Image: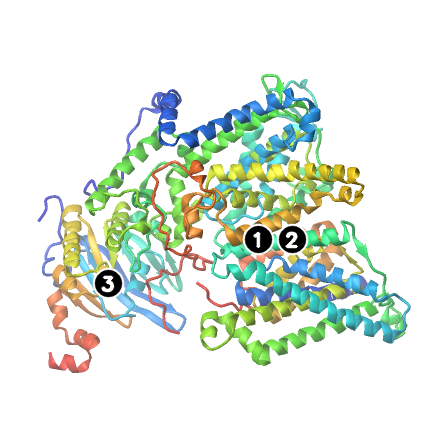
């Protein structure tokens, strides 16, 4: 346990209810329809403060859709989502209102993408600086006249940028263009950029995709550090079960847009419905 | 929150004294800066220095040389040079919209017109019923509004920016080519308004207009006060003095654009251009940021318009045509998208060809025609070919070098596989300062923007729902 | 309804049909390439100049026997359509095909460049002034002279001519795109060019045929313009192109019926604006309509039909 970071009581292993003020994200009955297709169906989902939660499920289960709704990129068809006491999505009758993504980021949710979406022709440092954009106070007129505030902020944010790059192990070539970096470095840069937005909650979308065993181990340790050193709450979408089982306090399984099971890694692993969803009925009966 | 995660916070930073000290430091640090630049790239520094000296010396040299020689050579007159600078300001402004933020504005002339008419309203006898004379050498009680030029510049910028924001607010969420058409429409509508508001009958609350000639119609408004500082006039009749005024304004424009480029906003624009959805997800308010680019770009055009109207002493709606918008676009495309120096060069070259070279060629042709008896040569007027030249330039540039001759490295990389300047060899002279970085020569052109007609509704990486 | 109102409608419909012909060109090309072919209005302008030249060359003047006139007009129509078709497909080859894989705005800028080139060609060819052509088709009022009505309302032979040329062309086009194999190929390519290619459709050829058709329609419209409005000028294409493009957008870009409907509506808007407001404001109004449609109802009246090219 690291000093200064509060863990929700009863978090490891997580069973039963968690007190309200320890819930960072609360989603109720969140639904997303694309025309006739229901991608996410009345999902209730909570993320306790300081926890590492994995969202798993077969392809097409609605995991990234759900991510997108938390971050404001998609507007749900209905439902409510709140974060850290603020409303992100509210539904009154048939009217659904959602914050815009940049507003959600300002509240403290950062994310990475399944297919890397860095700003390719900008340097690594610049990518991280863009991440800081939302919390910087300097305005365009400050820049035009190079006011003291602008100057001080630029210096401070560049320094913080270097620190963030160091934290993810990337400070050797801060001025290299993002798209010229090797794949693994790009993934780390995406995380650094997400950290730059000063999040309380970090959403990682398949962070270990394309990694070998040792890289995966490194990343798993890194995610633990995110919680222990930075006090972040982390929500992962993952397919690599070693990561999921090894690092999560809690696992939620989605299938066809619905919550199939939820609980500690061990509980979920033994759940026959989960086994059936992944491996088919025969495997479930054999479990 | 751990300090690494928490955002940067700066406390009070010493205010005015430290700012003055820093500006002063920049100024006094110039010799050292110059020496350092020279050490790192002597060719570039020498060339730029020669250019700067040349610009200052050109007017003096021009006047020193007998007019028979200056007329025989295809060198620009004072009016042409002033227009090079006026369009230079516009090119820098439109570069913010197209080059930095990546929005295609085809109606830039609207803001040019708005700036010009603002100057016309505020520095002429047009509103004869009023008499507001401030800081002018005109006698008090002189009819019309007569504000000093510096005030007019600021007001023109503000009015143009306001209209830019008004236009942009409902339209910036449209897709690229639709936005282009809408801005084109605006660029057509505004001059029509200026042309037709000659007979306005309007009654609202306490505002009453009867048969008011608001804008002077096709005849326009004249005379417009020439800019005047410390008793020196900078109008079209003042010879070469206006060139220095124009130069001063261009320098201010360059400084402003440069400061914007390397700021929080500049990075936000670049991010939006690269990947608008990712930028939004990283906390950039894309709507507001694009609007700002649009409004700031409009402000530059407003200043240019005010300068033009004050310099010429008159303005009419016929002056503002769609082709002017395209002309500025060409300056950017030709000169180099995203690169402030590139678009300036584009402005100079295009104005030179359009205003000096073509008519000089026409004159030479008629000379040759008269000399050889082939008088058809004399009847060829190269100016009537200007549209043709513009069109061929556009088609050819898009085909062979869409990023222009001196683009910013980012835009070149986005549009092309080869690094910029390969063909010209020495364009590294004009590249933006900053760390030189290798380009990836194997990447194909930049990704295309996904269709965005409303708020971002899609993040790739999400599986497309099966139909 | 008073006569002036009805008269405005008749005028609006006649010009509207011409807009519709040109609008079809815009909408066909946009449907298949997602490109706003800026130069299309200028192809129309050159078509009108070509028609003018041919009519003069063949000596088509008022007073000729009816059969001769009809025959010659048909000949001029066919030749003009052929020339503009070839012109249009050449433009595609030179200015758009090389940019097939470039960012979307590059072909748009290239189209603007092409438009300038064509305008200058018109300027150099026929000079800066408006050109006129006499009333080969009489302006006499059918209602009074043929039907013997006693009315101020005018429906002239010229307007009848417009309908006779444009409506069959529109119908033929609809049939072509809807029912023939080539038309199906065009629709498939518009929906999804990659898959269409995989299904054995020659995408390049299909696009070329689209441009041929669009060009031919513009040429026909050019002839109608000369014989109905009696005038042309080098920058006619800009105003006409604007109206035609707005028609296409108003009806729903990519949608053929929409283009026709849009053209008719725009013809009416133009006529009413000219009559009841002032011709000076008409252009501004048309642009206003365009902006309003794009901002408030970008899919147009009848809905878009474009591929999802995200």
Residue A45: image tag: 3
Q: Are marks 2 and 3 on the same chain?
A: no
x%, y% of residue B154?
54, 30
The disc label shown at residue B395, or none: 1
Relative to the observer, which residue lies in front, A173 or C98?
A: C98
Gap in angstroms between the C-alphas marked 2 and 3 = 62 Å
Q: Dividing the image into 4 quarters, which one contains the C terminus of chain B?
A: bottom left
Residue C169, compared with residue A242, is above or below; it is: below
Q: Chain of mark 1?
A: B
Q: Which residue is mark 2?
A: C117
Residue at the location (65% across, 36% down)?
A: B356
**Same subunit, tags 1 and 2:** no
- Label 2, residues with CA under 10 Å away: few <14, some 14-19, many ≥20: many
Q: In the structure shown, which secondary structural element does the residue marked by tag 2 occupy?
A: helix
Q: Position of residue A43 (x, y in %)?
A: 27, 66
Q: CA distance from mark 1 to mark 2?
A: 9 Å
Q: Nearer the viewer, residue C154 or B388?
A: B388
Q: CA distance from mark 1 to mark 3?
A: 55 Å
**The numbered mark 2 sits on a residue in which chain?**
C
Q: Mark 2 or mark 3, which is nearer to you?
A: 2
Q: Secondary structure at mark 1?
A: helix
């Amino acid at each position: 346990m690291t000093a200064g970071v509060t863990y929700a009581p009863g978090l490891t292993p997580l069973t039963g209810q968690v007190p309200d003020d320890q819930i960072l994200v609360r989603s109720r009955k969140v639904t997303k329809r694309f025309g006739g297709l229901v991608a996410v169906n009345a999902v209730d989902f909570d993320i306790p403060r300081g926890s590492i939660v994995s969202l798993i499920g077969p392809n097409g289960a609605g995991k990234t859709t759900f991510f997108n709704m938390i971050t404001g990129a998609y507007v749900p068809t209905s439902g409510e989502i709140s974060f850290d006491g603020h409303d992100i999505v509210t539904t009154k009758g048939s009217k659904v209102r959602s914050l815009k993504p940049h507003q959600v980021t300002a509240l403290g949710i950062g994310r990475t993408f399944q297919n890397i979406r860095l700003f390719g022709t900008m340097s690594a440092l610049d990518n991280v600086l863009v991440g800081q954009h939302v919390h910087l106070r300097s305005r365009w007129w400050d820049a035009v006249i190079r006011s003291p505030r602008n100057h001080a902020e630029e210096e401070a944010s560049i320094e913080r940028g270097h620190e963030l790059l160091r934290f993810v192990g990337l400070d050797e070539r801060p001025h290299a263009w993002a798209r010229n970096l090797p794949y693994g470095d790009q993934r780390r840069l995406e995380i650094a950029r997400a950290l730059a937005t000063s999040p309380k909650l970090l959403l990682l979308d398949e962070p270990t995709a394309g990694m070998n065993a040792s890289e995966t181990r490194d990343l798993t340790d890194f995610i633990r550090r995110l919680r222990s050193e930075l006090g972040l709450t982390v929500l992962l979408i993952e397919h690599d079960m070693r990561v999921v089982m090894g690092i999560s306090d809690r696992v939620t399984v989605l299938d066809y847009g619905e919550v199939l099971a939820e609980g500690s890694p061990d509980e979920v692993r033994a759940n026959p419905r989960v086994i059936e969803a992944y491996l088919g009925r025969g495997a479930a009966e054999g479990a | 929150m751990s300090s690494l995660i928490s955002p940067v916070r700066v406390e009070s930073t010493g205010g005015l004294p430290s700012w003055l000290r820093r500006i002063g430091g920049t100024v006094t640090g110039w010799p050292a800066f110059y020496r350092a630049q020279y050490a790192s790239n002597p060719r570039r520094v020498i060339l730029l220095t020669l250019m700067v000296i040349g610009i200052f010396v050109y007017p003096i040299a021009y006047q020193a040389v007998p007019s028979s020689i200056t007329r025989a050579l295809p060198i620009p007159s004072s009016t042409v040079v002033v227009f090079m600078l006026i369009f230079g300001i516009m090119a820098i402004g439109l570069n913010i919209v197209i080059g930095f933020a990546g929005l295609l504005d085809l109606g830039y002339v609207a803001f040019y017109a708005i700036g010009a008419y603002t100057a016309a309203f505020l520095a002429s006898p047009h509103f004869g019923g009023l008499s507001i004379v401030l800081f002018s050498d005109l006698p008090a009680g002189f009819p019309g509004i007569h504000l000093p030029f510096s005030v007019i510049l600021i007001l023109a910028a503000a009015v143009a920016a306001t209209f830019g924001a008004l236009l942009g607010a409902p339209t910036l969420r449209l897709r690229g080519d639709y936005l282009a058409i809408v801005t084109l429409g605006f660029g057509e509508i505004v001059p029509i308004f200026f042309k037709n508001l000659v007979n306005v009958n309007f009654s609202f609350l306490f505002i009453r207009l009867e048969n008011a000639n608001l804008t002077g119609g096709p005849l326009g408004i004249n005379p417009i006060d020439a800019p005047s500082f410390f008793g020196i006039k900078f109008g079209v009749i003042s010879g070469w003095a206006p060139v220095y005024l124009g130069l001063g304004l261009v320098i201010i424009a360059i400084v402003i654009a440069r400061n914007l480029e390397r700021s929080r906003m500049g990075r936000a624009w670049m991010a939006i251009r690269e990947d608008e959805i990712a930028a939004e997800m990283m906390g950039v308010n894309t709507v507001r940021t694009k609007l700002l680019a649009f409004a700031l770009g409009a402000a530059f055009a407003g200043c240019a318009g005010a300068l033009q109207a004050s310099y010429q002493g008159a303005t009419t709606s016929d002056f503002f045509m769609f082709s002017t918008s395209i002309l500025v676009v060409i300056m950017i495309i030709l000169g180099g998208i995203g690169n402030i120096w590139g678009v300036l060069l584009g402005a100079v070259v295009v104005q030179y060809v359009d205003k000096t070279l073509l008519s000089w060629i026409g004159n030479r042709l008629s000379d040759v025609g008269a000399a050889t008896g082939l008088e058809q040569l004399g009847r060829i007027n190269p100016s009537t070919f200007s549209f043709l030249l513009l069109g061929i330039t556009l088609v050819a540039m898009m085909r062979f070098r869409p990023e222009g001759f001196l683009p910013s490295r980012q835009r070149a990389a986005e549009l092309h596989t080869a690094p910029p300047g390969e063909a010209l060899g020495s364009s590294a002279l004009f590249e933006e300062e900053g760390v030189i970085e290798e380009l990836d020569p194997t990447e194909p052109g930049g990704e295309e923007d996904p269709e965005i007609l409303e708020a971002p509704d899609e993040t790739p990486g999400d599986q497309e729902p099966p139909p | 309804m008073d006569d002036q109102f009805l008269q405005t409608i008749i005028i609006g419909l006649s010009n509207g049909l011409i807009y519709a012909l040109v609008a079809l060109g815009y909408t066909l090309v946009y449907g298949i390439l997602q490109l706003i072919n800026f130069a299309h209005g200028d192809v129309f302008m050159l078509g009108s100049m070509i028609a003018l030249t041919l009519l003069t060359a063949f000596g088509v003047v008022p007073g000729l026997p009816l059969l001769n006139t009809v025959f010659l007009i048909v000949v001029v129509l066919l030749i003009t359509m052929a020339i503009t078709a070839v012109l249009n497909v050449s433009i595609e080859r030179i200015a758009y095909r090389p940019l097939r894989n470039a960012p979307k705005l590059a072909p748009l800028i290239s189209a603007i460049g092409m438009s300038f080139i064509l305008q200058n060609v018109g300027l150099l060819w026929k000079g800066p002034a408006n050109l006129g052509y006499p009333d080969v088709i009489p302006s006499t009022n059918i209602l009074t002279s043929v039907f013997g009505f006693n009315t101020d309302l005018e429906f002239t032979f010229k307007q009848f001519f417009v309908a006779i040329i444009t409506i069959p062309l529109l119908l033929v086009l609809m049939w072509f795109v809807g029912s023939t194999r080539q038309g199906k190929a065009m629709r498939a390519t518009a929906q999804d060019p990659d898959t269409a290619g995989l299904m054995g459709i020659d995408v390049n050829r299909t696009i070329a045929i689209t441009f041929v058709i669009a060009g031919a329609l513009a040429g026909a419209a050019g002839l109608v313009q000369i014989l109905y409005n009696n005038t042309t000028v080098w920058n006619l294409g800009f105003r006409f192109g604007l109206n035609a493009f707005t028609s296409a957008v108003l009806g729903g870009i990519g949608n053929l019926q929409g283009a026709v409907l849009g053209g008719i509506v725009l013809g009416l808007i133009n006529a009413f604006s000219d009559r009841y407001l002032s011709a000076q404001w008409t252009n501004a109004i048309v642009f206003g309509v365009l902006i309003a449609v794009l901002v408030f109802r970008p899919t147009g009246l009848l809905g878009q039909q474009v591929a999802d090219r995200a």
